[in-house]
């Protein structure tokens, strides 16, 4: 059996849809209940729902053989896993944003509000900018509005929240999307099974792109 960690929420539903249409369905997952773990012995898969930010932990520590995590999670926490493929869903960007009309004053330390500290540090180090990170867990857009920070580093999907708060993207840092990841030990001992799932998912995604 392949243990597969799926992120709870809309992204996880899209991910499961790919696996299901690729031939690794598990009908029990559609039942109306609060179960978190679902098996299909015939297909050799066991799915379970976990918090999106925890998928990489389950995979890294071997509780899951494979799973799906956002590229932002992989960059921020740098789990010791294999990144197998880009599923092409959950697309957004990691960006620096600030108040409309903001101009960076490079003669002083830049105050950056974010929950993605590692990504922010790596990005600003790459451009040689000194920063002071202010860790926030939510409502990050408030930080520059109230003068807590100069800018924020956060995920931007549609940009609606930024626009409604008189903010805008200053710099795109990196593209984000959902990635299929594997436990390193599992990939050694269950390589054939994992690659079968990966190949089927790739074929399904490719067929959808060809129809467009």
Image: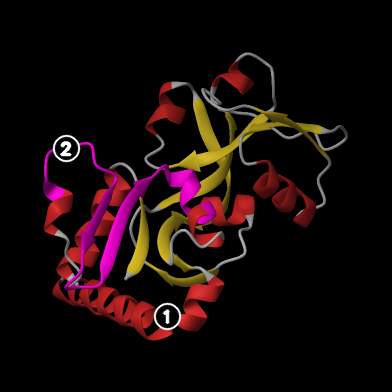
Query: Bounds of the magenta span?
Result: 30-57
Q: Position of residue 69 (x, y in %)?
A: 45, 55
Residue 210: image location, x then y, percent: 19, 77
Height in image: 44 above or below 33?
A: below
Mark 1–mark 2 distance (CA, rounded to whole Å): 31 Å
Q: Seen from this angle, which residue lies furthest bottom?
A: 192
Residue position marked by numbered label 1 in the rendering: 190
Tell me if residue 119 comes above or below residue 106 in the rendering. below
> What is the crowding at mark 2: few (fewer than 14 residues within 10 Å), some, or many (at least 20)?
few
Pick the quarter of the image with the C terminus.
Answer: bottom left
Tag shown at residue 33: 2
Chain-order first, disc 1 or disc 2: 2
| Position above or below: 106 against 84 | above
The N terminus - image quarter: bottom left
47 in magenta: yes
Question: Relative to residue 20, is residue 161 drawn left or right?
Answer: right
Q: Quadrant of residue 114?
A: top right
Residue 169 percent across, percent down from the top left = 53, 39
Q: Are marks 1 and 2 in contact (CB under 8 Å)?
A: no
């Amino acid at each position: 059996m392949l243990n597969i960690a799926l992120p709870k929420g809309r992204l996880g539903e899209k991910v499961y849809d790919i696996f299901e249409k690729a031939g690794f369905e598990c009908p029990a997952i559609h039942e109306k209940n609060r179960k978190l773990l679902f098996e299909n012995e015939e297909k050799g898969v066991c799915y379970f729902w976990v918090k999106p930010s925890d998928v990489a932990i389950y995979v890294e520590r071997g509780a899951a053989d494979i799973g799906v995590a956002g590229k932002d999670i992989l960059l921020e926490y740098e789990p010791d896993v294999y990144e197998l493929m880009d599923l092409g869903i959950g697309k957004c960007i990691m960006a620096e944003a600030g108040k409309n009309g903001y101009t960076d004053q490079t003669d002083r330390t830049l105050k950056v509000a974010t929950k993605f500290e590692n990504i922010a540090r790596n990005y600003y180090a790459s451009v040689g900018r000194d920063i002071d990170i202010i860790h926030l867990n939510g409502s990050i857009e408030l930080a520059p509005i109230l003068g807590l920070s100069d800018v924020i580093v956060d995920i931007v999907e549609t940009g609606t929240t930024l626009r409604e708060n008189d903010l805008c993207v200053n710099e795109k840092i990196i593209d984000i999307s959902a990635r299929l990841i594997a436990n390193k030990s599992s990939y050694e001992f269950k390589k054939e099974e994992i690659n079968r799932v990966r190949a089927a998912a790739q074929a399904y995604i490719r067929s959808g792109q060809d129809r467009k």
